[in-house]
Image (tube, grey):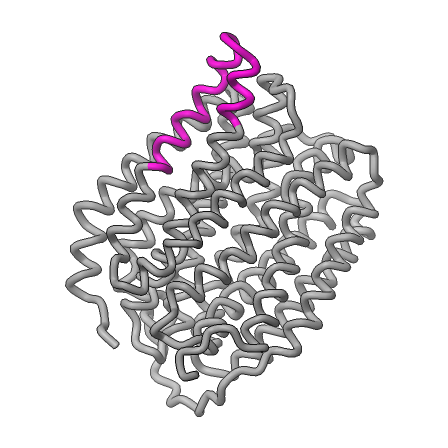
Amino acid sequence: MKDRLVTPSYCFILAANFLLYFGFWLLMPVLPFYLSEIFKVNNATVGIILSCYTIAALCIRPFSGYLLDTFARKPLYLFAYIIFTVIFGGYLLAGLLSVFIMMRVVQGVAFGMVTVGGNTIVIDIMPSSRRGEGLGYYGLANNIAMSVGPMAGLFLHDTGTPYPFIFCAALGSCFAGFLCALMVKTPYKPPVKREPISLDRFILLKGIPAGVSLLLLSIPYGMTTNYVAMYARQIDIPASTGFFFTFMALGMAVSRLFSGRLVDKGKITQVIAVALYGVIASFFLLWSCVYVMRWNPHACTFLFFGIALLLGISFGTMFPAYNTLFVSLAPNSQRGTATSTYLTSWDVGIGIGMLAGGYISEVSTFDKAYLFGACLTIVSAIYFYHTVAPHFHRNKIVR
């Protein structure tokens, strides 16, 4: 019973996580169209506006890790969750672009806190011997949301559903998730001695090398989640691009069947190393779609969705491994800091990907943006092999 993973609290936090990310992903592929259709902005400006959200989340992440390590975690988690939720209602009132941007910034701050809080709480309530498996299923909740969320959002948009209705759908999903979050029971966290403020209270210094490697991978990932629908439209792929996210999430679900257990057996760096090959291949193939389309549109369509499946398997395999890697470099008193460093690295890359994807597509085409991202994955892999893996094995904490 000590190593029991499935408990009521674990199930509730999985549901809360799924519903939070469903609301998030519902709008993700729709917002570029919303900004271009309602506010008449170009691709470069879309990238800047969307990146404000990620930049805001990035700014709060180091502080959220410190706060979660110092104070009671659940109240902070719930506070951030409800702020994130009510902002969807605020979008209904955002008649001016400046107001919309302000709403995105506030929601980005809340997102930065609630995601660190959720990741830290789920680590607290699961047995350490099954951490990789538990984080894998927790991530799977995100992946399922990533499957049905964008597909639902694009379906609503393509069928002419008014944007206020889409915002209300996201609001309802997150409110239901908040009710689930209320039901999570967290273990007692004794008061900790507040140490003098220092850099390692906000950033896990030992996690910086891994953070750099992860950042380079998240740049093309950010381009994909935000612009792949526009890319498909640009090269005239004759299929609903909402299914791209479905296949991607399916690949992530498949990866959860084995990746978490391998991580729990100590094969953290080996799992990441294998997944890197799939990530590199995926982005080079995504770049090549524009040329395959000229040769055979049907072959390009099959390739496009095959890439989504491979991307899902690759990233789904490495996510729990990277998360466990960061946590394994930190003492128990710095779990929040380790989690915030992990997510901060990811967010920095996502923000850069939004900006770079919008800018490159404005001055050139989306395929050039994906070529740039594919090259970054090679740099990340080389850096991981030569620096990150050796550093981890020298500094990991054995529990």
| Residue nearest the viewer, comparing 193 with 33 | 33
Q: At 44% across and 66% down in the image, what residue appears?
A: 134
Q: Is residue 283 magenta?
A: yes
Please provide percent x and percent y for residue 5: 46, 73
Please provide percent x and percent y for residue 24: 64, 52
Residue 333 appearing in the image? yes
Residue 31 appearing in the image? no
Which quarter of the image is occupied by the N terminus? bottom left
Please tell me whether residue 263 is drawn above or below residue 7 in the rendered image: above
Which quarter of the image is occupied by the C terminus? bottom left
| Residue nearest the viewer, comparing 234 with 39 | 234
Of helix, strand and loop, which mostly describes the magenta segment?
Answer: helix
Q: At 16% across and 55% down in the image, what residue appears?
A: 390
Please provide percent x and percent y for residue 221: 46, 40
Q: In the image, 47: left or right of 292? A: right
Task: Give the tally of numbered discs.
Answer: 0
Which residues make up the magenta segment? Answer: 278-304
Q: Is residue 382 magenta?
A: no
Q: Residue furthest front?
A: 1
Please tell me whether residue 79 is drawn above or below residue 101 in the rendered image: below
- Name which quarter of the figure residue 238 lies in: top right
Q: In the image, 96: left or right of 380? A: right
Please provide percent x and percent y for residue 250: 53, 44
